[in-house]
């Protein structure tokens, strides 16, 4: 099965540099984010996508709706695809990054009410194990940057520091083979 992954389009919080992992906080795509999703739809239009997995966050769901408009696909919302709960909801990403970098073990560190990078990677890898049994030619996953770091790390056998270095642009398409 071909696993096609798509990072959501540019969001209002991307422009503002703020953290968001709470599905109850609506963070929409910008006009540029919608254009990015439309361009992704053109790249995906010829793939046999009949099943889509998406996080609970608005920006990912908006991107998915635009990206699969020409497909007859079932959409499955899965919380394991949510952005990492940094514990810095609504606060600057720079503040979260500073706190993480100053920790003795940044990948195990977590803020109060947050989730460590290691915990996020484990939930993403559990999702990948579950969908390995799906009987489809191609599956689309619409999710977030750090989640896609974990997906890439899974398929490329990357260490946590190597995963952290993976960069995925808004509406960038990644493809992997699930066996």
Image: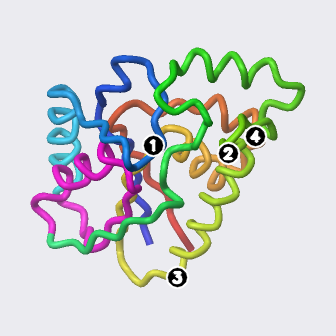
Tell me the residue that label 3 is attached to: 133
Q: Secondary structure at mark 3?
A: loop
Q: Position of residue 12 (x, y in %)?
A: 29, 26
In three-dimensional space, the C-alpha distance between marks 2 and 1, rounded to whole angstroms, equals 15 Å
- Specify whether 62 is left or right of 55: left
Q: Which mark sits nearer the N-terminus, 2 or 1?
A: 2
Q: Nearer the viewer, mark 2 or mark 4?
A: 2
In-front residue for pair 144/21: 21
Tell me the residue that label 2 is attached to: 115
* Residue name at image x 28 percent, y 52 percent: 61
In three-dimensional space, the C-alpha distance between marks 3 and 2, rounded to whole angstroms, equals 27 Å
Q: Secondary structure at mark 1?
A: loop
Q: Position of residue 83 (x, y in %)?
A: 50, 45
Q: Is residue 85 above or below residue 73?
A: above
* Residue name at image x 53 percent, y 60 percent: 80
In three-dimensional space, the C-alpha distance between marks 2 and 4, rounded to whole angstroms, equals 15 Å
Residue 76 lies in quadrant: bottom left
Q: Magenta stretch: residue 10 in it?
A: no
In-front residue for pair 170/156: 170
Q: Residues within 10 Å of mark 3 (few under 14, many from 20)?
A: few
Tell me the residue that label 4 is attached to: 160
In three-dimensional space, the C-alpha distance between marks 4 and 1, rounded to whole angstroms, equals 17 Å
């Amino acid at each position: 099965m071909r696993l096609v992954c798509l990072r959501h389009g540019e969001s209002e919080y991307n422009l503002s540099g703020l953290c968001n992992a709470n599905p109850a906080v609506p963070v929409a795509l910008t006009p540029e984010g919608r254009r990015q999703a439309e361009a992704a739809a053109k790249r995906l239009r010829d793939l046999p996508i009949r099943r889509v997995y998406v996080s609970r966050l608005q920006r990912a769901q908006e991107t998915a709706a635009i990206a699969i408009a020409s497909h007859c696909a079932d959409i499955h919302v899965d919380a394991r695809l949510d952005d990492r709960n940094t514990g810095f909801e609504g606060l600057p990403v720079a503040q979260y990054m500073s706190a993480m970098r100053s920790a003795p073990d940044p990948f195990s560190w977590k803020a109060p009410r947050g989730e460590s990078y290691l915990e996020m990677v484990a939930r993403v890898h559990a999702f990948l194990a579950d969908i390995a049994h799906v009987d489809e030619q191609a599956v689309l996953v619409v999710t977030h940057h750090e989640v896609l770091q974990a997906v890439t790390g899974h398929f490329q056998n990357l260490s946590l520091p190597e995963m952290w270095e993976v960069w995925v642009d808004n509406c960038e398409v990644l493809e992997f083979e699930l066996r």
